[in-house]
Image (cartoon, rainbow, N blue to C red):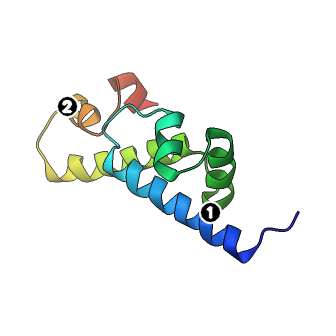
Amino acid sequence: MATTIVQKHFHRLQISRALIFLKDNLDKKLTLTEIANASGASQYHFIRVFSAYTGETPFSFIARERIARSLQLLIERDEAIIDISHAVGFDSSSSFNK
């Protein structure tokens, strides 16, 4: 089944909404339902489209963004690693270490 130009534009719009939502809420524990709702898609449709357009799952994206933000904070701030890991949304130091 071929994807039309209109569908591609709509998918990009959904992904754009999701990325904005994710970046604005990285410090929170997010569910697939919340992310899909922010994009305007069903969960099933969202995860398929997100993965197709970004090459990763939403939760892989979240983990990568949290790591990037934590690296920036580790450079900029003189805080304990555990405090920084919590500030960017990791539940524990062990999840940050993984």
Q: Position of residue 52 (x, y in %)?
A: 69, 57
Q: How many marks?
A: 2
Report the quarter where the N terminus lies. bottom right
Residue 61 vs 79, above or below: the answer is below
Q: Residue at x 50, y 43 (%)?
A: 37
65 or 43, nearer to the observer:
43
Residue at the right extreme of this rendering? 1
Label 1 secondary element: helix
Q: Earlier in the sequence, mark 2 or mark 1?
A: 1
Amino acid type, label 1:
His
For label 2, the residue is 83
Percent position (x, y) of residue 28? 33, 35
Which quarter of the figure has residue 70?
top left
Indicate the position of residue 20 as horizontal and vertical percent values: 39, 57
- Which residue sits at x=20%, y=31%? 83
Say what amino acid the circle numbered 2 marks.
Asp
Q: Residues within 10 Å of mark 2 (few under 14, many from 20)?
A: few
Instruction: Give the label, 2 or 1, closer to the camera.
Output: 1
Per the model, the C-alpha gap separating discs 2 and 1 is 37 Å
Label placed on residue 11: 1
Residue visible at 58% across and 66% down in the picture: 12
Which numbered tag is attached to residue 85?
none
Q: Classify residue 8 by image quadrant.
A: bottom right
Residue under the image location 52 percent in, 40 percent down: 59
Residue in front for this viewpoint, 44 or 40? 40
Q: Is residue 6 left or right of residue 34?
A: right
Indicate the secondary structure of the residue bearing disc 2: helix
The 10 Å Cα crowd at callout 1, few under 14, some 14 to 19, many 20 or more, is many
What x and y, as percent, mark residue 30?
42, 34
